[in-house]
Amino acid sequence: MHPYLAGLAGGALIGLSVAGLMLLNGRIAGISGLVAGLGQDRGERRLTDLAFVAGLISGPALFAWLSGAWPEMRFVASLPVLALAGLLVGFGTRLGSGCTSGHGVAGLARLSPRSLMAVLTFLAAGMLTVAALRWLAP
């Protein structure tokens, strides 16, 4: 399999799922909002949130079934660092009223100025973080 084929297929599936949720339910596929919705009583909307998140979680198993191998993952940080990073990302998504999936995939597709500013902020923060880490730990 060509090394870019899996990424291309994954991107296409993300685009289709975001478009499908918007067209069929009128909802934005922001993962942080969908996951947050699982802890609230939203009636039928909770079932949609649960189905969408279950689809995300089952993705690697589907990949393994179709390709015959599990996706390769490598963690270079310790568990406490990963936990802290997850908490900071969660805080940032609440502060920024959404995450990269909601703003970057759905928001930019709708030409949302707020999403454009959020994505530019995400990218700038990511670039600064990488530059700082490379400078501190060459």
Image: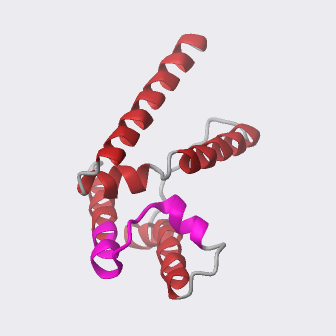
Looking at the image, residue 78 lies above or below residue 125: below
- Quadrant housing residue 23: bottom left
Range drawn in magenta: 17-37
In this rendering, is residue 41 above or below 110?
A: below
Farthest residue to the front: give it: 113
Give the quarter of the figure containing the C terminus: top right
Could you say where residue 17 lies in the image, as x and y percent from the top left? 33, 70
| Viewer-closest of 20 and 33 | 33
Main SS of residues in magenta: helix
| Residue drawn at 73 percent across, 43 percent down | 79
- Determine whether, in the image, residue 132 is placed left or right of residue 39: left
Q: Is residue 111 magenta?
A: no
Q: Is residue 35 magenta?
A: yes
Say which residue appears at 31% left-offset and 42% top-offset.
116
In-front residue for pair 4/85 = 85
Image coordinates of residue 59 in percent, x first then y, are 46, 68
Residue 77 x %, y %: 66, 36
Tell me what residue is drawn at x 54 percent, y 17 percent: 132
Q: Residue at the location (53% across, 59% down)?
A: 32
Q: Residue furthest bottom?
A: 44
Q: Position of residue 54 (x, y in %)?
A: 53, 75
Quarter that holds the N terminus: bottom left
Which residue occupies the foreground of this view, 113 or 81?
113
Question: Is 138 above or below relative to 3?
Answer: above
Q: Nearer the viewer, residue 69 or 30?
A: 30
Q: How is the image coloured?
A: secondary structure
Residue 92 falls in which quadrant of the image?
top right
